[in-house]
Image (spheres, rainbow, N blue to C red):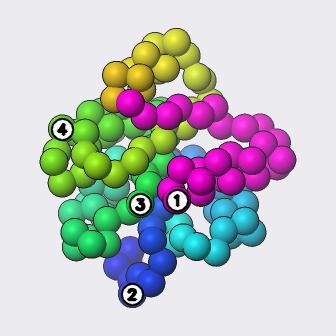
Amino acid sequence: MHKQAQQKPVILWVDDDADDSQLFREAFESHNTRHQLVQVWDAMEALAYLRQQDQDLKPVLIVLDINMPLMNGKELLSELKGNPVYRGIPVVMVSTSNTAEDQEFCERYHVMIMEKPDSEEGIDQMVRQLVNVAL
């Protein structure tokens, strides 16, 4: 399902919220021509996707929602940063609740955390920031 001929570097988007994912996909496609967006719905699907990729086709950025069922974004981040194969991939955590605890957790792993915006303009701005991180 996810394996395609990939000419463009991949940004992997991990978020269980279909509405948020659709809004971000639309903003991404209107603002970015350098990257391919691959969306998966949970941490287990993200791990499966990553395991399928060759070393040279790893994502240039992983965007993780913190609040997901089964395995949340923090657990996935811990697993990624604990694995030498994935440790070097930049990760940005996103959440509707940007708590002090979430910020401290992200600081420990040296990853950026962004609050999910609630406006189209905010989503556009966030997508531009994420593309800059991927560059």
Name the residue located 72 percent from the left edge and 38 percent from the top edge: 117
Residue 49 coordinates in the image, percent (x, y): 30, 64
Mark 4: few/some/many CA within 10 Å (<14, 14-19, 20+):
few
Kindly indicate the quadrant of the structure image that contains residue 78: top left
Of residues 57 and 67, the one drawn nearer to the viewer in this rendering: 57
Tag 4 or tag 3, which sits nearer the N-term? Answer: 3
Tag 2 or tag 3, which sits nearer the N-term? Answer: 2
Residue 60: give its label: 3
Q: How far separated are the C-alphas under marks 3 and 4?
A: 18 Å
Q: Was residue 59 drawn as part of the magenta stretch in this picture?
A: no
Residue 52 left/right relative to 58: left
Type of the residue with mark 3? Val
Residue 126 left/right relative to 79: right
The label nearer to you, 3 versus 1, is 1
Name the residue located 29 percent from the left edge and 49 percent from the top edge: 88
Q: How far separated are the C-alphas under marks 1 and 2?
A: 21 Å
Magenta residues, as a range? 110-135
Find disc 4 in the rendering and name its residue.
82
Residue 45 coordinates in the image, percent (x, y): 33, 57
Q: Was residue 119 drawn as part of the magenta stretch in this picture?
A: yes
Is there a contact, CB below 8 Å, between mark 3 and mark 2? no
Type of the residue with mark 4? Gly
Task: Name the image quarter holding the N terminus.
Answer: bottom left
Find disc 1 in the rendering and name its residue.
135
Is there a contact, CB below 8 Å, between mark 1 and mark 2? no
The secondary element bearing badge 2 is classed as loop
Q: How far separated are the C-alphas under marks 3 and 2?
A: 16 Å
Find disc 2 in the rendering and name its residue.
5
Type of the residue with mark 1? Leu
Residue 127 coordinates in the image, percent (x, y): 66, 53
Type of the residue with mark 2? Ala
